[in-house]
Image: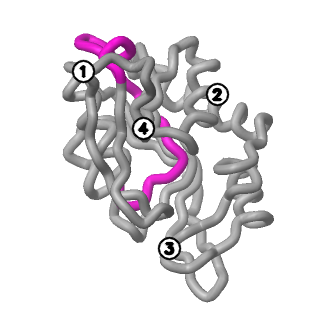
Amino acid sequence: MQALKERIQREGKLLGNGILKVDGFINHQVDPDLMDQCGAEFARLFANVGATRILTAEISGIAPALMTARHMGLPVVYARKSKPVTMPDQVYLTIAPSHTKGHMVELIVSPEYLGKGERVLIIDDFLATGATILGLVRLAHAAGAELVGIGTLIEKIFEGGRESLKTMNVPIHSLVTITAMEDGRIEFAEED
């Protein structure tokens, strides 16, 4: 997606250790117009999967998931990283490594909002190693839901995440694919 790619080229910062800082428009400050364009593109790409719910991880996945849900007319459920007192005692919980935090984080979903028979579309900000997305898949499966697709804003193909998700047998779409981040440069895959 050209608008997202241009924004990454203009404002993305390489911090080393495979970390791309996109805080100015996705992860800390959110550009609603850009996220709306991304949501519309995801809605187009996943129009025929029959999703009934969108699942994401707190907090960076919420903006693209919400805009996708707006265009698809679906609710969004996000996995929390800590359990609030308002959540029931019995929850779906898994852990996943966080690349940017440098440690394991919990992903928690209430059974009130994710259950048997749901057709889940996962939307997140990054696909790197695939660990967070695999955590979301585990939550969906624990709830008895069916995974119908995975969408990410940015894929770092060199970290192998897509390979780890191939056994899911669902469509996987990334709006921008990065093939390398070296020497202060970001290299992008050619768009289809």
Q: CA distance from mark 2 to mark 3?
A: 27 Å
The residue type indicated by label 1 comes to Gln
Q: Earlier in the sequence, mark 1 or mark 3?
A: 3
The residue type indicated by label 2 comes to Met
Magenta-colored span: 110-130
Q: Earlier in the sequence, mark 3 or mark 4?
A: 3
Q: CA distance from mark 1 to mark 4?
A: 14 Å
Dot 2: within a 10 Å radius of its alpha carbon, few (fewer than 14), some, or many (20 or more) residues?
Answer: many
Tell me what residue is drawn at x 20 percent, y 27 percent: 142
Q: Which one is closest to the eye, mark 3 or mark 4?
A: 4
The residue to which callout 1 is attached is 90
Q: CA distance from mark 1 to mark 3?
A: 36 Å
Q: Earlier in the sequence, mark 2 or mark 4?
A: 2
Name above or below for residue 31 compared with residue 4. Answer: above
The residue type indicated by label 4 comes to Ser
Q: Which one is closest to the eye, mark 2 or mark 1?
A: 1
Q: Which one is closest to the eye, mark 1 or mark 3?
A: 1
**Residue 124 in magenta?**
yes
The answer to whether the residues at label 2 and label 1 have Cβ atoms under 8 Å apart is no
Disc 1 on helix, strand or loop?
A: loop
Label annotation for residue 18: 3
The residue to which callout 4 is attached is 82
Tell me what residue is drawn at x 50 percent, y 73 percent: 18
**Residue 55 in magenta?**
no
Disc 3 on helix, strand or loop?
A: loop
Dot 1: within a 10 Å radius of its alpha carbon, few (fewer than 14), some, or many (20 or more) residues?
Answer: few
The residue type indicated by label 3 comes to Gly
Please identify the quarter of the rendering in which residue 122 is found.
Answer: top left
The answer to whether the residues at label 1 and label 4 have Cβ atoms under 8 Å apart is no
Q: CA distance from mark 2 to mark 4?
A: 24 Å
Name above or below for residue 150 compared with residue 44. Answer: below
The residue to which callout 2 is attached is 67
